[in-house]
Amino acid sequence: MRIVFVIDQVYLHGGIERVLSIKANYFASQDNYEVHIITTEQKGKTPCYSFNENIVFKDLAINYNRKKSYFHPKNLKKLPKHISRTKAALKEIKPDVVVVCSHSVDTYFVPFIVKGIPKMKEFHYSRFIEKDKRENPSLFKKYFFKFADYVETKYDKLIILNKDESNYYKSNNTVVIPNPLTFFPQKVSDLNSNHIITAGRIAAVKGYDILIDIWTEIAKTRKDWKLHIFGSGESGYVEMLQNKINKAGIQDTLQLMGSTDKMKEEMLASSIFVMTSHNECFPLVLLEAQASGLPIVSFDCPYGPRNIVDNETGILVPVYDNTAFVKQLNKLMDDRETIQKMGAKARENSKKYSLDQVMNQWNNLFTEVIK
């Protein structure tokens, strides 16, 4: 089976790029699969994740100006070249199935080119973020959403990450396939440390400013626990968070750690994972925390955490209820027995998302659409 994955680039660290590397590597290691990845702006840069040497890369060199809207004239004039080069690549490769991964320009024309090839679209973000704009759209957005909804009906399948997301799609071609677990360590955390961890892109949507407010309250009575935030982001935003930490005087117990390629080791050295995001779709980092045996305390934000965490594996707190978050986290920090019980259940829950189980769902879907 010959698969083509379509994405803008694979040189920047991100959830989509990471999941693509896992899936592509899995299929490339199977005898009956041939994997191709088409990019639009790789720019000759080295992929940030490891890819199987059997995977064939092809960059179309469209190179959109990412600082401007895709609808900006400077980007729109590149669209004909993008369409023609994509068509030529697909005709040359002759794939059995095409999967569009990133949410960029090709999303809107791939279903209409080189007919006869089954085509799928993956969604890695929550459509919740469009809710207000869809309910009160500008004139442009009104017609854009109608166009986008029409395009989605032309894909053979739309792959979404959790069942709650299906409520946001007009078409009836959605299929739920979660992200696969990226690692399953042989050992788990002993849960005896006084370390709490969180990780992700340092951006406003992750709510780290809220987490700092929460920890400011925690730190008033606790000096024996530490919170580490792992991840990178725009320098100005990171500086703002650091200034907030310094102003609160909690820099001894809360630290911005930057990026790390040893996330597994950091989780295994921790006892609790926390998340204060405004919204999530299917946060892979929660699965990694569970695989490491960590209980989770998270806002019950739309719509990812509730599809991974339950009352046996962690605690879901009403969104933006900082007081409740402080109370629940403090309670858990005082109860090492509950930490151990939740950690064990979390580890068991993560097994449902093993690579083989998730990729078997993809394999069955490919077989279905090809038939």
Image (tube, grey):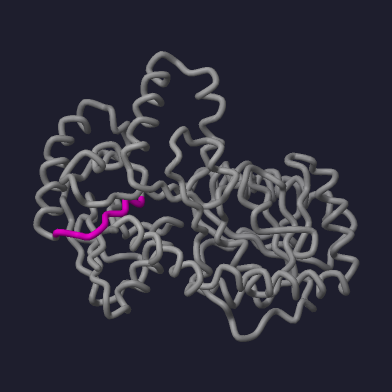
Q: How many marks?
A: 0
When the figure is inspected, residue 266 is found, relative to residue 47, above or below; the finding is below
Residue shown at the point (85%, 54%) measured from the top left: 328
* Residue found at the far top of this picture: 139
Q: Position of residue 99 (x, y in %)?
A: 31, 54
Query: Does residue 309 appear to the left or right of 206 in the view shown?
Result: right
Q: Quadrant of residue 49?
A: bottom left
Quadrant for the N terminus in the image = bottom left
When the figure is inspected, residue 313 is found, relative to residue 206, above or below; the finding is below
Q: Quadrant of residue 42?
A: bottom left
* Residue found at the far bottom of this picture: 186
Query: Does residue 27 appear to the left or right of 64 in the view shown?
Result: right
Quadrant for the C terminus in the image = bottom left
Which region is colored magenta? Answer: 94-101
Q: Position of residue 365 (x, y in %)?
A: 39, 60
When the figure is inspected, residue 29 is found, relative to residue 76, above or below; the finding is below
Q: Position of residue 342 (x, y in %)?
A: 79, 69
* Residue found at the far front of this picture: 371
Residue shown at the point (57%, 78%) measured from the top left: 184
Query: Does residue 364 appear to the left or right of 179 in the view shown?
Result: left
Q: Is residue 129 magenta?
A: no
Q: Position of residue 56 (x, y in %)?
A: 20, 68
Residue shown at the point (24%, 38%) measured from the top left: 109
When the figure is inspected, residue 5 is found, relative to residue 324, above or below; the finding is below
Query: Does residue 76 appear to the left or right of 151 in the view shown?
Result: left
Q: Is residue 98 magenta?
A: yes
Q: Quadrant of residue 319?
A: top right
Residue shown at the point (29%, 37%) measured from the top left: 108
